[in-house]
Amino acid sequence: MATIFSKIIAGEIPSYKVAEDEQFYAFLDINPLAQGHTLVVPKHETDYFFDLEDNEIAAMQIFTKKVAAAIKRAYPCIKVGQAVLGLEVPHAHIHLIPMQSERDMLFTNPKLKFTAEEFKQTAAKIHAEFEK
Ligand code: 5GP
């Protein structure tokens, strides 16, 4: 059965898309720790990030680097933090979170709430920077 992220990539479930190429898809986390919290996923479905092939991890990290740069330009922060958890969704993904302090990386923090319009604008802002 396809993962929820595969359904998002296929457009069967809506998402706030930030960036995409042939291999990877980046979209806003629906329960963000900070405005601009983005998930990067391979279109090819694999549960565990560290089970990805070496070349896929390398390519994913290069794509993620570009997304992180776009997030930082769109939402100025000290640095963009990267995390791999995968405890909830069995489809490998990288979390990118703009950090004002290390506390912003605490996944036990309460999640932020945004309206659909705010999510849309956030995704559009990062996407515009990604395309530059
Ligand atoms: P993890 O698997 O890394 O522990 O957590 C999965 C992440 O995916 C969580 O931060 C959660 O908010 C996010 N997530 C789960 N389902 C959806 C969804 O349907 N849409 C989006 N945009 N994010 C999701």
Image (spheres, helix red, strand yellow):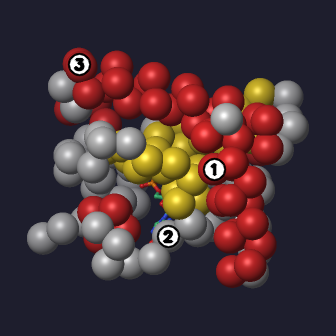
Q: Which image quarter: residue 50?
A: top left
Q: Mark 1 points at which residue?
A: 127
Seen as rendered, the residue at the extreme left is 1
Question: Percent position (x, y) of residue 89?
Answer: 35, 60
C-alpha span from label 2 to label 1: 13 Å
Q: In this view, does 58 lie above or below 20?
A: above
Label 3 near label 1: C-beta < 8 Å? no
- Name the residue nearer the viewer: 117 or 46: 117
Q: Which image quarter: residue 117?
A: bottom right
Amino acid at the residue labelled 1: His
Tag shown at residue 15: 2
User: In the rendered image, which quarter contains the N terminus?
Assistant: bottom left
Number of residues whose C-alpha sits closer than 10 Å to that of mark 3, classed few (under 14), some (14–19) or many (20 or more): few
- Name the residue nearer the viewer: 43 or 33: 43
Amino acid at the residue labelled 3: Asp
Which residue lies at the image location 62% right of the left edge and 67% below the top edge? 31
Q: Mark 3 points at which residue?
A: 54
The CB of the residue at mark 1 lies under 8 Å from ligand 1: no
Q: What element carries label 3?
A: helix
| Left or right of 43 in this view: 40 | right
Q: Kindly tell me whether residue 105 is visible in this rendering.
A: no
Which residue lies at the image location 22% right of the left edge and 31% below the top edge? 52
Q: Is mark 1 on a helix, strand or loop?
A: helix
